[in-house]
Amino acid sequence: MKFDNEHKNQIRKAFYDLRNVEDFIHLLNRIRAYVFGDRIEPFNKAQLSLLARHNSSFDRYYGFEIKKKNGSNRQIFAPHKELKYIQVCLNDILNAVYDVHEAATGFVPDRSIVDNAEKHVRKKICV
C-alpha cells in the first residue's frame, strides 16, 4: 500500500513513540485497518508471541514447487496468511520510518530491477 506523506508522518511518529508491545500491536492494527479494512481480524499479543517464537512447533511457511522455463522445478516457501498479513503491515511501517538509499532498487516501492539495469546500459564493464 502506498501512503501519502501525512500518513507516513503519522506512522513515523507512532513508531518513535512506541513504549511497549501493546503500543506496537496498536500501530500494527492501525496499518491493518488501513490496508485490509475489516477483511482480517485485529492482531493480538498471543498471535504475535506465537509467530515470534523461534522454537515454536507452529509452521510459519509452506512449500510448493513451480516449473522453471528450463523444465526443472523451483522450490518456493511462502508465509501462511497470518504471518503474511503481519509482514505486509511491518513493511509499510518500515517504509514509512526508513529512507532508502538512492542506489537501492530491490523491494523498494516504485523501483524495480529495470531501474537498476538502466544504470548499466552501454557500460563497458558490469560487475
Image: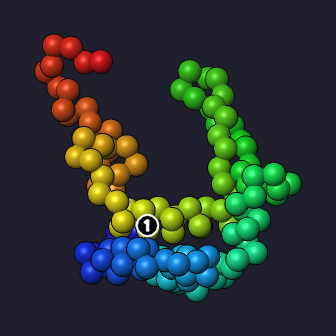
Which part of the image, by quadrant, shows the N terminus? bottom left
Q: Amino acid at mark 1?
A: Asp
Tell me if residue 40 can be seen: no
Q: Which residue corresponds to the image point at 31% horizontal and 43% vertical from the top-left?
A: 105
Q: Which residue corresponds to the image point at 27% horizontal and 81% vertical from the top-left?
A: 6
Q: In this orientation, which residue lies closer to the viewer: 92 or 99?
A: 99
In the rendered image, which quarter is residue 112 located in? top left
Where is residue 30 drawn, in percent x and y?
50, 83
Mark 1, Cα crowd under 10 Å, few <14 / some 14-19 / many 20+, is many
Q: Is residue 118 above or below residue 83?
A: above
Q: Which residue is mark 1?
A: 92
Q: In this orientation, which residue lies closer to the viewer: 31 or 68?
A: 31
Q: Locate residue 64 relative to residue 90 in the image: left or right.
A: right
Q: Which residue corresponds to the image point at 34% horizontal and 60% vertical from the top-left?
A: 98
Label 1 residue SS: helix
Tell me if residue 30 can be seen: yes
Q: In this orientation, which residue lies closer to the viewer: 120 or 69?
A: 120
Q: Locate residue 30 relative to residue 126 in the image: left or right.
A: right
Q: Locate residue 93 relative to residue 24 in the image: left or right.
A: left
Q: Which residue corresponds to the image point at 36% horizontal and 73% vertical from the top-left?
A: 12
Where is residue 94 drawn, in percent x and y?
42, 62
In the rendered image, the residue lying farthest to the top is 124
Which part of the image, by quadrant, shows the C terminus? top left
In the rendered image, which quarter is residue 44 located in? bottom right
In the rendered image, which quarter is residue 53 located in? bottom right
Q: Is residue 53 above or below residue 18?
A: above
